[in-house]
Image: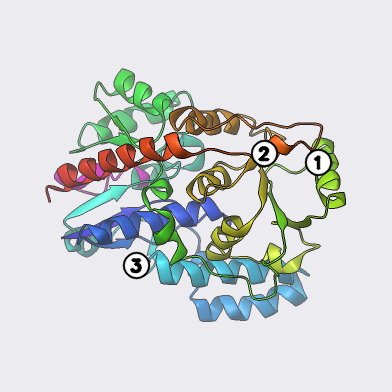
């Protein structure tokens, strides 16, 4: 069987996006399904091969003064070529020969049905799989990411999903919205990154060449920026003898340019993770690492509810910001959560088998 995976491919460099995509491909591969990720591009500048990206790295260094960002984009490009299995670029519409090539199209994971991410009807139709015949449409851990669908996009949303042979979503809110708007039952399944075990992620993880991971270190990863509370906690940890490795920190260029495989490795070897990221929490869980969660600063504070769902589902401790450095900061017990995770993995695999009829 051949399956085309539809997910977000034209966004900024994001560890979670790339890792969930590579997980979907790996899961399908374990089921003996030949899968590719459709490389949907919307602007001409995204039609770049790795060779072209390499040229742009040098070009960006001089024209934009942002060599580090260009390096980071190249690192992500190389990772995706190896683990995400992109098709040739598809611009604006999926040609009939691509539709005919695949037995089924899987939409997900990530916020593929977030209406704010689709700036016009072309993108909205694409993420709804409107280009595919109804008997070829399946969603896998798709996320809507908002509480409602705007009126101007609702008709297409309802019409497209009515043609799906199977629907699964990542959050309860999405299942509720589909039930109310479409009148269909969407099965709730876990994020694809949780479906691979530690040993499987070890085969993808890669040690950063210039980072000393043998030292005891605290890894910080913040998508919403760091506030004063983070800085205070970091300083306490530094004074206690921990190295501080900050992802997305231009002051630590070898960390700023880390690719998704290095992200996984860095979490796997860390003594503690400080984060506002859902996927940093996911990999802390997979590798049974202690963590400290901060509410995301700025306009994305709703992310904490997604993390709360993860913590509740797997009986994980709610380790939010603490003003002091206490021993319990490094204590963790994932035994009950791991048993529940095995059940959720089986549920997700069963969904795929039934949806794909394999």
Residue topped by disc 1? 233
Q: Is residue 21 left or right of residue 78?
A: left
Real-space Cα separation, disc 2 to disc 3, in angstroms: 38 Å
Q: Which mark is residue 292?
A: 2
Quadrant, the N terminus: bottom left
Callout in the foreground (3, 1): 1
Residue plotted at (63% across, 39% down) = 331
Q: In the rendering, at what x and y percent does residue 327 appear? A: 73, 38
Q: Are marks 3 and 1 in contact (CB under 8 Å)?
A: no
Mark 3 and mark 2 in contact (Cβ < 8 Å)? no
Q: Secondary structure at mark 3?
A: loop
Residue 235 picture location, percent across and down: 86, 46
Where is residue 31 drawn, in percent x and y? 21, 57
Q: Nearer the viewer, residue 330 or 107?
A: 330
Separation of residues labelled 2 and 1 (CA atoms): 10 Å
Mark 2 or 3, closer to the camera: 2
The residue indicated by pointer 3 is 87
Q: Is 28 placed left or right of 19 in the picture?
A: left
Disc 1 secondary structure class: helix
């Amino acid at each position: 069987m051949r399956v085309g995976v539809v997910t977000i491919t034209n966004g900024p460099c994001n560890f979670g996006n790339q890792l969930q995509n590579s997980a979907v491909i790996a899961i399908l591969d374990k089921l003996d399904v030949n899968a590719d990720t459709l490389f949907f591009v919307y602007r001409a500048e995204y039609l770049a091969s790795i060779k072209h990206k390499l040229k742009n790295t040098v070009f960006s260094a001089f024209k934009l003064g942002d060599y580090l960002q260009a390096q980071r984009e190249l690192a992500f490009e190389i990772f995706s070529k190896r683990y995400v299995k992109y098709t040739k670029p598809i611009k604006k519409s999926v040609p009939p020969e691509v539709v005919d090539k695949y037995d089924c199209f899987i939409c997900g994971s990530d916020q593929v049905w977030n209406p704010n991410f689709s700036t016009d009807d072309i993108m909205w139709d694409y993420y709804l799989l409107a280009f595919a015949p109804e008997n070829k449409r399946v969603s896998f851990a798709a996320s809507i990411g908002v509480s409602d669908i705007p009126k101007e996009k609702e008709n297409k949303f309802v019409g497209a999903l009515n043609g799906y042979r199977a629907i699964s979503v990542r959050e309860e809110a999405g299942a509720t919205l589909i039930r109310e708007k479409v009148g269909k039952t969407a099965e709730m399944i876990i994020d694809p990154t949780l479906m691979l075990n530690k040993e499987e992620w070890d085969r993808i993880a890669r040690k950063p060449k210039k980072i000393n991971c043998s030292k005891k270190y605290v890894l910080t990863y913040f998508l919403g920026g760091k506030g004063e509370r983070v800085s205070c906690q970091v300083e306490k940890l530094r004074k206690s003898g921990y190295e501080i490795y900050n992802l997305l920190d231009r002051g630590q260029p070898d960390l700023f340019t880390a690719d998704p495989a290095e992200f996984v490795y860095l979490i796997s070897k860390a003594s503690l993770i400080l984060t506002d990221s859902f996927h940093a929490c996911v990999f802390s869980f997979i590798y049974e690492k202690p963590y400290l969660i901060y509410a995301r600063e700025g306009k994305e504070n709703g992310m904490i509810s997604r993390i709360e769902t993860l913590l509740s589902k797997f009986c994980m401790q709610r380790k939010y910001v603490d003003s002091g450095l206490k021993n319990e900061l490094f204590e963790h017990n994932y035994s009950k959560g791991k048993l529940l995770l095995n059940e959720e993995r089986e549920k997700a695999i069963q969904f795929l088998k039934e949806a794909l009829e394999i």
